[in-house]
């Protein structure tokens, strides 16, 4: 199996796991009366314990090496930014957007991240977007418009809070995608994910204090927590981030469309969420946008 095929399978599998986890989150919010501020701290903390515990047994010296400030203080700073501002905040905002709308809407808003990455790259390279990149940006804007307004110029089909949290979530994807290159060159990605989850779990426990909410999950709720921890955190991030170096970030962003597709199918067929023609058109625009951004940039010929 070639690296490109392997990378495609890994990234699509990881994205599909995110879609399944998102739908489970939607079920927990709508049917089990769970709150994102209760679920996310527990989810992150448990996933962090699992991954860090695995590497503690496997290679504890490597596990704590990123925190060796004397050896490389930049690693510690990178891990804090990647783990807290990137992965952890992304997890919270993603589930908050699901709670405020649906899993399908949350995932498609999160998939605006490739356009934001493109804008960051243009700023870094001090250049204007190319024609196909401008078309991608336009398609992304049209897709979000159709998805959030259903074609109406006077009202939103989702709440403003869901729109804002979804867009900010896409910004955090940019952070955890672009920031950790130096770390990933030194350490296994699942180990970095473990620290990111653990930091987020501790931080959000201190901020939201879920133990004070008085919520006690049912047996189904406990099963849902297990699903979002194992499938949505451990499997999804490990599979996706392992596939990105093999397929490349541009193709990976295209393959990640498996996430909103999976979420939309499950939330519509299983959870009964409405899916309109406007939603389909919005999804289509985002998908074409990802295709355009996955194309290689044209090279100038030298005569």
Image (spheres, rainbow, N blue to C red):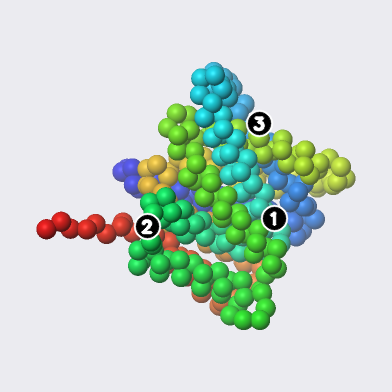
Q: Earlier in the sequence, mark 2 or mark 1?
A: 1
Image: 36 above or below 57? below
Q: Which quadrant is the C terminus positioned in?
A: bottom left
Question: Which residue shows up at 73% across the image and 41% down it?
Answer: 204
Image: 31 above or below 202? below
Asked if residue 187 lies left or right of residue 171, the reply is left
Q: Earlier in the sequence, mark 2 or mark 3?
A: 3
Q: Which residue is mark 2?
A: 127
C-alpha span from label 2 to label 1: 35 Å
* Quadrant of the image occupied by residue 234: top right
- Secondary structure state at the residue bearing disc 1: helix
- Secondary structure state at the residue bearing disc 3: helix
Q: Which residue is mark 3?
A: 49
Q: Please name whichever residue, 181 or 158, is drawn nearer the observer in this view of the structure.
A: 181
Give percent across and percent down for residue 67: 58, 24
- Secondary structure state at the residue bearing disc 2: loop
Q: Earlier in the sequence, mark 3 or mark 1?
A: 3
Give percent across and percent down for residue 261: 52, 62
Q: Is residue 180 visible?
A: yes
Residue 96, which numbered label? Answer: 1
Give percent across and percent down for residue 246: 37, 43
Question: Which residue shows up at 74% across the image and 56% down it?
Answer: 29
């Amino acid at each position: 199996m070639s690296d490109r095929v392997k990378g495609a399978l890994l990234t699509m599998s990881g994205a599909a796991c995110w879609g399944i986890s998102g739908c489970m989150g939607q079920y927990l919010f709508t049917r089990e009366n769970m709150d994102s501020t209760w679920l996310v701290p527990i989810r992150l903390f448990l996933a962090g314990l699992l991954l860090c515990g695995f590497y503690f047994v496997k290679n504890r010296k490597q596990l704590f090496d990123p925190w060796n400030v004397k050896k490389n203080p930049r690693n510690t700073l990178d891990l804090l930014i990647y783990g807290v501002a990137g992965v952890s905040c992304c997890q919270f905002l993603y589930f908050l957007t699901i709670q405020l709308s649906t899993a399908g809407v949350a995932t498609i808003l999160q998939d605006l991240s490739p356009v934001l990455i493109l804008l960051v790259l243009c700023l870094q390279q001090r250049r204007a977007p190319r024609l196909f990149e401008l078309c991608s940006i336009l398609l992304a804007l049209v897709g979000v418009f159709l998805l959030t307004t259903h074609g109406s110029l006077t009202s939103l089909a989702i709440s403003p809070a869901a729109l804002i949290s979804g867009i900010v979530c896409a910004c955090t994807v940019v952070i955890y995608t672009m920031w950790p290159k130096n770390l990933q060159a030194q350490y296994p990605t699942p180990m970095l994910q473990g620290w990111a989850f653990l930091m987020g779990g501790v931080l959000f426990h201190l901020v939201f204090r879920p133990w004070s909410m008085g919520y006690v999950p049912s047996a189904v709720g406990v099963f849902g927590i297990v699903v979002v921890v194992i499938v949505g955190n451990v499997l999804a991030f490990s599979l996706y981030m392992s596939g990105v170096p093999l397929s490349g970030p541009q193709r990976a962003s295209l393959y990640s469309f498996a996430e909103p597709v999976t979420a939309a199918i499950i939330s519509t067929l299983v959870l009964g969420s409405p899916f309109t023609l406007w939603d389909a058109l919005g999804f289509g625009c985002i998908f074409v946008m990802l295709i355009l951004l996955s194309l290689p940039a044209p090279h100038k010929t030298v005569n």
